[in-house]
Image (cartoon, rainbow, N blue to C red):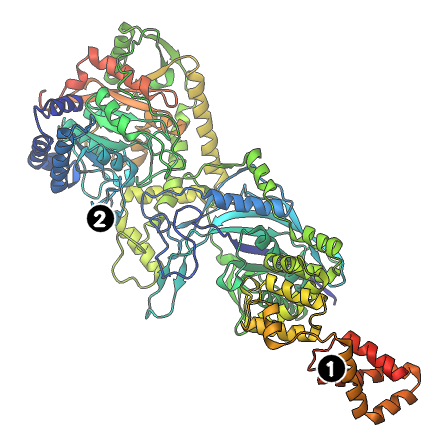
C-alpha cells in the first residue's frame, strides 16, 4: 500500500526578553540554579504576576511577521497540574483567546516550488522550571531559573507531508524569529523546541490517521530523524494489522531511540480557566502601528531583494537570507566590494571555516569589513583568487588587521608587470621543450587543455603571485606564434 | 485611652498627651490580660511593636508624622509581613515567614503605624464564623458563646475587645462586613481594585479585597487613606487617584436617595434585625435622605454563583501549597504523589478541603460550562442588577446577615446553612462594589450592623453617610465593657 504522512508541529520559542514574563527576574541562560528566580517565580503565597509588555510586543511582532490575525483582546488562562518544577501548581498560558490567530509561513521545496504552511495560532505562556534527577541519591533537585521565561507556542495546521518539509518549515521559522530579534535561536540551549505530531494514512484517504506526538526535539537533525523513525514505525504497525495508539513519545537524539511516554487515557484534566490575577490584554491600533513601523525586512522580502538588487541565484539568495546574522554579514561584506564575490565567499570559505570551528557568524574572526577589503583586492587584481584564500586564512588566524596588511607583510602582491611575467614564461618554455613541441603539433581544439600545464608551471614559478589572466594571455601569444 | 477612637488617639499623640510607646504598651498589656478569652491573635509582635512605637515617637518629635503615626493596629494573618510568621490560619503555613512585605502592611509601616500582631482568621479566609482556624475558634467579645463572624473574625474581635485601635481585614464574600456587624464595629470593603492585593494570600483572586476595620467611619477613612492606591505589583489594582476620605465625611446627606432592595427584606430575615435596619434608615431620612424600594432580582442566585467561582479560584490558588517549597511537608514521603497527598491532607482543614474539591469539580472537563461559565454569567446578571438599582438611588442599604451572631458550634455541621447566611454580602463581591457595615443596635445582647453598598469607587459617599449617622447615633460607642 502507498502511505501518506501527515505532520503538524508545535514549536516552543523562548522570547529574548531581559526579564521573565510575569516577574522582574533575569532570563539569562546558564546561571547557578535558583539564582534567577524571585518570589513570583517561586510562587510564594501572596505574590502576583504582572505582564512583561516586551513579551507581548514580541508575540505581536511574530504575528505581524507571519501575516497572522492579531486577537485584539487576548486572555491568559491557568493550566492546572502538579509537578515540582511548576511552582504555582498551574502554568499561565493562553487557550481560548491566544494573542496570535491564523497566519502562514511559505517554504521553498527542493524542486524550487513554494508551499504555504498554515499557522493555526500562537499563544504566550510561561516556561516551567527544571527537575534534576542526577546527583541527589533518590531525591530530585529543582532549578527554577527557567520558571517564568516567556515562550510563544506556535501551532501549525497538519499541512506538512514529510520530514523534509517539516525541516524546511522549522528552518524557515527559525529564520523568521531570529530576523525579528524575538528569539536568540540557540536550539542547543532550548531556545526553540519542536513537538511533532505524526500520522500516516493510505494515499488518497481523506480522513487523518491516529497521531502520536514526539516532544521536545531541539535540533533540525533530531527532528528529521524522529519523524522518519516514527513514520516507519507507524507503517510497520499498520501493515502488520495493528493499530496506532494515540500517545506522547520521547525521542533520544543521542541514541536515536524512541519510546512511549504516556497514552491519551492517562492524560491530565488541566482545568483551564481565565487567570483572575491578570486582566485581558487589549491591543490598541497605535501599538500595532508602531510595531509595524519597526518591523525588520522579513526573510522572503530579503531573498527577493537579494535576487533583484545583487543578481544572486535563487538558491544562494535563499541561504543568505535565511538567517539574520548571515544576511547582515553578507550585506556588510558586499557593501563597497562585489555582491557576487561576497556571496561566494560567505557561502564558501566563511561558512566552511565557521562550521569547522563551530563558531557563530556573529563571532567570525574575519569580520564582514575584513572580507570586503579582501574582495576589493581581488577585484583590483592585487591578488588572485587563490592567493586570496591564503590571505583569508591568515586573517582568520589573526595574522593581520586587514587584507592589505597581510598582503604587504607576506609579499603576496600579484605580479602584473608584463616584462617580469614574460621572463618567467620564457624560463618555463625553455625548461619544457618537449611539451612545447607537443603543444604546437596538437590540433587547435586540444590546445586549450594542454595550455593548463604551462599555466600551472608559470604560476608555480611565481609562487602563485603572477596574474593568472596575464600568464594565460602571454603564454598563448608565445606558444601560438 | 483604649475606649477612644483611632482619630482621638491620633489627636492625643499629636498633642503630646500620650506617647506611642505608652499607647502601644497599654494595648500589649490588654492583649496579655484578655486575649486568652477571645483568641483574636495568632501572633503578637511585642518587641517589634515597641520598636516601631519608639520610632513613631521620634517621627512625631521630628515633626514628620501622619494621622496614623504611632497608632497600634493589628493585621489579619494573611497579609505577608517580612520576618513575621504569616499562617493564613492554616497548619500548612504554620512555619511560613514571608521574605517580603504585602503592599497594605508596607503602607502602614511607611506611615509609622505600629503592628501589634497578626489576627486569627478562618483558614485561608474560608468561613463565616471563624471556627475554621487551625489556631482555634475566635470568640465574640460581646458574648464568648457566640461566633465573632468570619473570616476576619480575629480582626473584628480584637477591635471590639479594645485590643487594637484598628485592624485590617479582607472581604471575599462578606468577611469584613459580617464580622464587623457581629462584633459591633465599623468595617469597609472597598471597590475591587481600590486596594492592592499584593502580598495578601489569595483565596479567590477576583473577589478578595482588603479593607479597614475600626470603631468608627472616621477611623476607617483614616485607614483607607493609607491603604488605597495603585500598585504596579498588582495588575488588577486600578490606577485612580485616591481622594482624602476624611475631607468629605461631614458632607450633607440632603437629597441622597437610599435604595432598599425588597429581596433583602423577604423571608429569612430576623424580625428584630429588620427593625434595627428600618430604624437606621429612618434616622437617615431625618438627615435629609429619601428612601426608595429597589430590586435585585437575581440576589438568590448569588449564593450558588459565589460558591462555584470562589472555590474554583481557590482550588488553583491553593495548588502551590504542595509541600515542595515552603510550609508543611509530611514526614518521610514514599514518593512524589505521597508527598503531595499527605502534605495537603495534613495541612488543610475540612472547610478548605471541601472548597478545593468543589472548585476542582466545577472546573473539570465536561462540567466547566455547566458550572463555572454559568456562574460567571450569573455574576454578570448580578452586577447588572446593581447597576440598574444605582440608576434609581445613590446608596443601597440593608442587613449584613439574617441574624445576629449565632453560637459557636451551632452551624458547623451544616455547611450549606452556613453558606446561606452570607446572602446579603456575597453579591457585593460578585459585582466588585464597595460595601460597609455600621453598628445599628443590639439584639439579645449581640450587635447588629447596617450594610451600605455604594457605586464603584464611591467609598467617599459610604464613609460620609456612615459618619453622619455616627454623629447622630451612639451605636458605634457601645462597648462590650460598658454594657
Query: Residue B199: image x %, image y %?
Result: 30, 41
Query: For mark 2, what is the residue?
Result: B94
Q: Which residue is drawn at 54% across and 41% down?
A: A97
Question: What is the secondary structure assignment of the residue under circle 2?
Answer: loop
Res B55 label? none
Question: What is the secondary structure assignment of the residue under circle 1?
Answer: helix
> Total label count?
2
Query: Residue A103: image x %, image y %?
Result: 64, 46
**Mark 1 vs mark 2: same chain?**
no
Q: Which residue is drawn at 74% across and 74% down?
A: A416
Badge 2: how crowded within 10 Å, few (<14), some, or many (20+)? some
Give the camera-side residue of A26 and A248: A26
The answer to whether residue B454 is visible is yes
Determine whether, in the image, residue B10 is placed left or right of residue A178: left
| Quarter location, residue A159 | bottom right
The answer to whether residue B297 is visible is no
Determine whether, in the image, residue A284 is placed left or right of residue A128: right
Badge 1: how crowded within 10 Å, few (<14), some, or many (20+)? some
Among all residues in the image, which is located at the extreme bottom?
A434
User: In the figure, B360 relative to A405: above or below?
Assistant: above
User: In the figure, B238 relative to B357: above or below?
Assistant: above
Query: For mark 1, what is the residue?
Result: A459
Q: Mark 2 lies on which chain?
A: B
Give the camera-side residue of A231 and A149: A149
Amino acid at each position: 500500500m502507498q502511505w501518506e504522512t501527515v505532520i503538524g508541529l508545535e514549536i516552543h520559542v523562548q522570547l529574548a526578553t531581559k526579564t521573565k514574563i510575569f516577574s522582574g527576574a533575569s532570563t539569562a541562560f546558564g546561571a547557578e540554579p535558583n539564582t534567577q528566580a524571585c518570589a513570583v517565580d517561586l510562587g510564594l503565597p501572596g505574590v502576583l504576576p504582572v505582564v512583561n509588555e516586551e513579551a507581548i510586543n514580541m508575540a505581536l511582532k511574530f504575528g505581524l511577521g507571519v501575516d497572522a490575525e492579531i486577537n485584539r483582546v487576548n486572555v491568559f488562562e491557568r493550566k492546572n497540574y502538579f509537578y515540582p518544577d511548576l511552582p504555582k501548581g498551574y502554568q499561565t498560558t493562553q487557550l481560548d483567546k491566544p494573542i496570535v490567530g491564523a497566519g502562514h509561513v511559505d517554504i521553498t521545496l527542493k524542486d524550487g516550488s513554494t508551499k504555504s504552511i498554515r499557522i493555526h495560532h500562537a499563544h504566550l505562556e510561561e516556561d516551567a522550571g527544571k527537575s534534576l534527577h542526577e546527583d541527589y541519591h533518590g531525591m530530585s533537585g529543582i532549578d527554577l531559573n527557567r520558571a517564568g521565561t516567556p515562550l510563544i507556542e506556535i501551532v501549525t495546521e497538519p499541512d506538512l507531508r514529510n520530514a523534509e518539509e517539516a525541516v524546511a518549515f522549522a528552518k524557515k521559522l527559525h529564520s523568521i524569529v531570529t530576523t525579528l530579534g524575538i528569539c536568540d535561536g540557540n536550539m542547543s540551549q532550548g531556545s526553540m523546541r519542536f513537538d511533532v505530531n505524526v500520522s500516516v494514512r493510505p494515499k488518497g484517504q481523506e480522513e487523518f490517521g491516529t497521531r502520536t506526538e514526539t516532544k521536545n526535539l531541539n535540533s533540525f537533525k533530531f527532528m528529521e530523524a524522529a519523524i522518519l523513525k516514527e513514520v516507519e514505525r507507524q507503517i510497520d504497525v499498520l501493515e502488520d494489522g495493528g493499530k496506532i495508539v494515540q500517545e506522547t513519545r520521547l525521542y533520544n537524539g543521542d541514541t536515536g531511540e524512541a519510546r512511549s511516554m504516556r497514552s491519551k487515557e492517562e492524560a491530565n484534566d488541566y482545568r483551564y480557566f481565565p487567570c483572575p490575577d491578570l486582566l485581558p490584554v487589549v491591543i490598541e491600533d497605535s501599538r500595532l502601528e508602531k510595531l509595524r513601523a519597526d518591523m525588520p525586512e522579513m526573510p522572503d522580502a530579503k531573498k527577493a531583494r537579494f535576487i533583484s538588487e545583487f543578481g544572486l541565484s535563487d538558491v544562494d539568495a535563499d541561504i543568505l537570507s535565511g538567517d539574520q546574522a548571515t544576511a547582515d554579514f553578507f550585506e556588510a561584506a558586499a557593501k563597497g566590494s562585489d555582491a557576487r564575490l561576497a556571496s561566494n565567499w560567505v557561502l564558501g570559505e566563511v561558512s566552511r571555516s565557521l562550521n569547522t570551528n563551530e563558531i557563530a557568524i556573529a563571532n567570525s574572526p574575519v569580520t564582514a569589513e575584513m572580507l570586503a577589503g579582501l574582495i576589493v583586492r581581488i577585484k583590483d587584481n592585487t591578488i588572485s583568487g587563490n592567493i586570496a584564500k591564503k590571505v583569508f586564512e591568515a586573517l582568520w588566524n589573526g595574522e593581520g588587521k586587514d587584507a592589505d596588511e597581510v598582503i604587504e607583510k607576506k609579499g603576496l602582491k600579484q605580479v602584473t608587470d608584463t616584462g617580469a611575467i614574460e621572463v618567467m614564461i620564457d624560463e618555463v618554455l625553455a625548461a619544457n621543450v618537449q611539451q612545447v613541441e607537443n603543444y604546437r603539433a596538437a590540433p587547435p581544439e586540444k590546445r586549450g587543455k594542454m595550455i593548463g600545464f604551462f599555466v600551472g608551471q608559470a604560476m608555480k614559478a611565481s609562487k602563485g603571485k603572477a596574474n593568472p589572466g596575464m600568464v594565460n594571455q602571454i603564454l598563448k601569444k608565445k606558444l601560438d606564434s | 485611652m483604649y475606649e477612644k477612637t483611632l482619630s482621638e488617639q491620633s489627636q492625643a499623640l499629636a498633642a503630646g498627651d500620650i506617647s506611642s510607646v505608652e499607647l502601644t504598651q497599654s494595648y500589649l498589656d490588654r492583649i496579655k490580660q484578655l486575649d486568652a478569652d477571645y483568641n483574636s491573635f495568632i501572633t503578637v509582635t511585642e518587641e517589634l511593636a515597641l520598636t516601631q512605637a519608639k520610632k513613631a515617637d521620634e517621627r512625631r518629635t521630628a515633626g514628620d508624622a501622619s494621622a496614623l503615626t504611632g497608632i497600634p493596629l493589628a493585621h489579619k494573618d494573611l497579609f505577608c509581613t517580612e520576618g513575621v510568621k504569616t499562617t493564613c490560619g492554616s497548619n500548612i503555613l504554620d512555619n511560613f515567614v514571608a521574605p517580603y512585605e504585602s503592599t497594605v502592611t508596607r503602607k502602614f509601616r511607611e506611615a509609622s503605624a505600629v503592628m501589634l500582631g497578626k489576627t486569627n482568621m478562618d483558614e485561608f479566609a474560608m468561613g463565616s464564623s471563624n471556627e475554621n482556624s487551625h489556631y482555634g475558634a475566635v470568640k465574640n467579645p460581646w458574648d464568648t458563646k457566640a461566633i465573632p463572624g468570619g473570616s476576619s473574625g480575629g480582626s473584628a474581635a480584637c477591635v471590639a475587645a479594645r485590643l487594637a485601635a484598628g485592624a485590617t481585614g479582607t472581604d471575599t464574600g462578606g468577611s469584613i462586613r459580617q464580622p464587623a456587624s457581629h462584633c459591633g464595629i465599623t468595617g469597609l470593603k472597598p471597590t475591587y481594585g481600590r486596594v492592592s492585593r499584593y502580598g495578601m494570600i489569595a483565596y479567590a483572586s477576583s473577589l478578595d479585597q482588603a479593607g479597614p476595620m475600626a470603631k468608627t467611619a472616621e477611623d476607617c477613612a483614616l485607614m483607607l487613606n493609607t491603604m488605597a492606591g495603585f500598585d504596579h505589583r498588582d495588575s488588577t489594582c486600578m490606577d485612580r487617584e485616591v481622594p482624602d476620605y476624611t475631607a468629605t465625611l461631614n458632607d450633607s446627606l440632603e437629597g441622597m436617595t437610599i435604595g432598599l432592595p425588597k429581596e433583602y427584606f423577604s423571608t429569612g430575615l430576623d424580625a428584630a434585625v429588620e427593625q434595627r435596619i428600618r430604624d437606621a434608615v429612618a434616622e437617615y431620612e431625618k438627615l435629609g435622605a429619601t428612601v426608595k424600594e429597589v430590586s435585585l432580582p437575581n440576589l438568590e442566585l448569588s449564593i450558588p454563583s459565589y460558591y462555584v467561582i470562589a472555590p474554583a479560584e481557590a482550588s488553583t490558588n491553593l495548588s502551590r501549597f504542595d509541600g515542595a517549597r515552603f510550609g508543611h511537608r509530611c514526614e518521610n514521603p514514599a514518593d512524589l504523589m505521597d508527598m503531595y497527598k499527605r502534605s495537603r491532607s495534613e495541612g488543610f482543614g475540612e472547610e478548605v478541603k471541601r472548597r478545593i474539591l468543589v472548585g476542582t469539580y466545577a472546573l473539570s472537563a465536561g462540567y466547566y460550562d455547566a458550572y463555572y461559565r454559568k456562574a460567571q454569567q450569573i455574576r454578570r446578571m448580578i452586577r447588572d442588577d446593581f447597576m440598574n438599582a444605582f440608576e434609581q438611588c445613590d446608596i443601597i442599604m440593608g442587613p449584613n446577615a439574617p441574624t445576629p451572631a449565632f453560637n459557636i458550634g451551632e452551624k458547623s455541621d451544616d455547611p450549606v446553612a452556613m453558606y446561606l447566611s452570607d446572602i446579603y454580602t456575597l453579591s457585593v463581591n460578585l459585582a466588585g462594589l464597595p460595601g460597609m457595615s455600621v453598628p445599628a443596635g443590639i439584639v439579645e445582647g449581640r450587635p447588629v450592623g447596617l450594610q451600605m453598598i455604594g457605586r464603584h469607587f464611591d467609598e467617599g459617599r459610604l464613609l460620609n453617610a456612615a459618619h453622619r449617622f455616627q454623629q447622630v447615633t451612639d451605636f458605634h460607642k457601645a462597648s462590650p465593657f460598658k454594657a
